[in-house]
Image (cartoon, grey):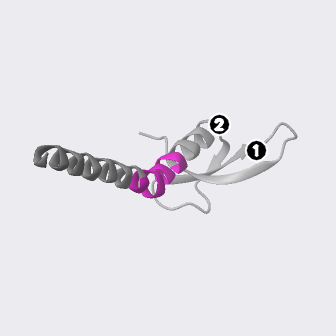
Amino acid sequence: MKDATGELSMTAIAVVAIAAIGVVFTQLVWPTIKKNITRSAHCSEAYGCTTTGATAGTVKCFYMTDDAGTTTDIICPSQSA
């Protein structure tokens, strides 16, 4: 009976640990990954890039946010190599 109780305790600890890792991932890691994916997608669709208003190694570009032609500016990494 003691062995069964020990295994149940270890299972509970494992479930709590997995849940904690899931919470940390969804609250801290995933928003950063999502932001980088979104920025990369916007930079791949960007046009009218210029170095004015950007820091070293970056360019200031524009992209269309919708089909109505609304534009937003975004800072993208410089593509010159």
Q: Amino acid at mark 2?
A: Glu
Residue at x-position 63% and y-position 53%: 74
Q: What whole-number distance in Å separates the C-alpha atoms at marks 1 and 2?
A: 10 Å
Give the residues in magenta. Answer: 23-35
Tell me if I can see residue 77 in this picture.
Answer: no
Q: Residue at point 59% right, 38% down?
A: 41
| Image location of residue 8, percent across then percent down | 23, 46
Q: Residues within 10 Å of mark 1 (few under 14, many from 20)?
A: few
Task: Give yes or no for residue 26 being in the magenta stretch.
Answer: yes
Residue at the extreme front of the image, as rendered? 1
Count neighbours of disc 2 (C-alpha within 10 A) and say few if under 14, some if 14 to 19, many if 20 or more: few
User: Which residue is pictured at 17% across the width and 43% down the height?
Assistant: 4
Image disc number at residue 18: none
- Identify residue for label 1: 65
| Residue 28 appears in view | yes
Q: Main secondary structure of the magenta part?
A: helix
User: Closer to us: mark 1 or mark 2?
Assistant: 1
